[in-house]
Image (spheres, rainbow, N blue to C red):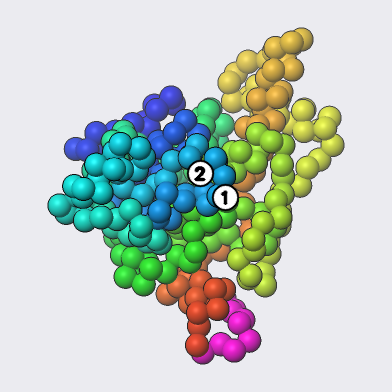
């Protein structure tokens, strides 16, 4: 895979691959390729990928198959012969590769990359330091979640399509109640804004891990410059150092959010995850106290 692009051809696809396609310059839609031309992914239907009820809903286009404008109107009259009309489906769904891509290019999300490669990537949502589980485990998780529609309620910041794909690949779940999920494209936005912790809708789990905290500006600048200088094999001074430090702050913050280095994650079997999501959303009939313990 190149540093500038993770684009691949369809012939290179293998079952268990985490794939994605750009919906706009700032948003990617993710899923798990399970073979036979099918992709399992997590979505919010009805053109409500963000669901703010504002113009932002139109800026970041919906992730549902065949989204947007004339294409959506044409799709209403001529739905995919394999997938049918999926425009209003919510949760974990399966689509053919063409519907998943919705006219976009095909990219492969990378796992087990080095810190140097991770820092060199200009965009989030393309790779992680975390290692992937075997393909058969990845496909099994995706199919189980599809059968049970068991990944909870879609939420752009802390429970989105990238979170779904990363969980299927790794079995790792973010347990922090003060941070966003594992989605690296969302975490990149947080890093770019200089945000270290976000108070978001919590998963409701009673366990929270260690969070990355902001040190003094001087230490952050020093660490960022040092790390980037080591990675790129160069040392800049003057105006160049200021620019390098700013970019370094972004890269180091993005690294701190990566699920491969975070401390607030744990391996959760898919059966436990489905139960957990049901309890969180009040859908469990056998837990009156709405408590869930992960053992």
Residue 156 x/y as whole percent? 53, 51
Give the vertical position of 175 relative to 7 (above or below): below
Q: Residue furthest top?
A: 238
The residue sitting at 61% across, 38% down in the picture is: 189
The residue sitting at 42% across, 74% down in the picture is: 271
Q: Is residue 291 magenta?
A: yes
Q: Residue furthest left?
A: 81
How would you classify the magenta stretch by its main secondary structure?
loop
Query: Can residue 172 be seen by looking at this rendering?
Result: no
Q: Is residue 127 magenta?
A: no
Question: For the residue labelled by badge 1, is the local secondary structure a helix, a strand or a loop?
Answer: loop
Tell me whether circle 1 and circle 2 mark residues in contact (CB < 8 Å).
yes
Query: Can residue 289 be seen by looking at this rendering?
Result: yes
Give the vertical position of 17 relative to 247 (above or below): below
Residue 150 x/y as whole percent? 42, 69
Question: For the residue labelled by badge 2, is the local secondary structure a helix, a strand or a loop?
Answer: helix
Residue 57 is marked as: 2
Q: Nearer the viewer, residue 99 or 163?
A: 99
Residue 185 x/y as whole percent? 53, 41
Residue 93 x/y as whole percent? 33, 59
Residue 52 is marked as: 1
Residue 69: name its quadrant: top left
**Real-space CA distance between mark 1 and mark 2, rounded to the nearest whole angstrom:** 6 Å
Q: Earlier in the sequence, mark 1 or mark 2?
A: 1
Q: In screen coordinates, is 111 left or right of 282?
A: left
Q: Residues within 10 Å of mark 1 (few under 14, many from 20)?
A: few
Q: Residues within 10 Å of mark 2 (few under 14, many from 20)?
A: some
Give the vertical position of 200 relative to 104 (above or below): below
Q: Which residues are magenta?
A: 286-294
């Amino acid at each position: 895979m190149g540093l500038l692009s993770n684009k691949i051809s369809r012939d290179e696809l293998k079952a268990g691959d985490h794939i994605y396609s750009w919906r706009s310059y700032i948003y990617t839609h993710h899923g798990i390729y399970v073979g036979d031309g099918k992709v399992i992914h997590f979505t919010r239907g009805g053109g409500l990928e963000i669901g703010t009820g504002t113009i932002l809903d139109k800026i970041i286009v919906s992730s549902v198959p065949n989204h947007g404008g004339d294409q959506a109107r044409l799709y209403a009259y001529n739905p995919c012969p394999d997938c049918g009309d999926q425009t209003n489906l919510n949760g974990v769904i399966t689509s053919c590769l063409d519907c998943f891509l919705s006219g976009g290019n095909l990219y492969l999300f990378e796992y087990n990359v080095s810190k140097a490669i991770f820092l060199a990537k200009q965009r989030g949502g393309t790779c992680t330091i975390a290692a992937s589980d075997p393909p058969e485990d990845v496909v099994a998780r995706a199919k189980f979640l599809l059968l049970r529609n068991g990944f909870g309620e879609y939420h752009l910041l802390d429970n989105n399509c990238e979170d779904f794909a990363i969980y299927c690949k790794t079995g790792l779940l973010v347990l922090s109640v003060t941070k966003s999920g594992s989605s690296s494209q969302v975490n990149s936005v947080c890093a770019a804004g200089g945000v270290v912790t976000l108070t978001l809708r919590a998963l409701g789990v009673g366990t929270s891990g260690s969070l990355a905290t902001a040190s003094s500006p001087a230490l952050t600048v020093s660490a960022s410059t040092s790390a980037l200088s080591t990675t790129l094999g160069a040392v800049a001074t003057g105006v160049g150092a200021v620019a390098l430090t700013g970019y370094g702050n972004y890269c180091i913050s993005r690294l701190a959010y990566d699920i491969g280095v975070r401390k607030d994650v744990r391996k959760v079997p898919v059966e436990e995850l489905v139960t957990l999501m049901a309890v969180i959303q009040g859908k469990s009939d056998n837990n009156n106290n709405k408590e869930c313990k992960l053992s």
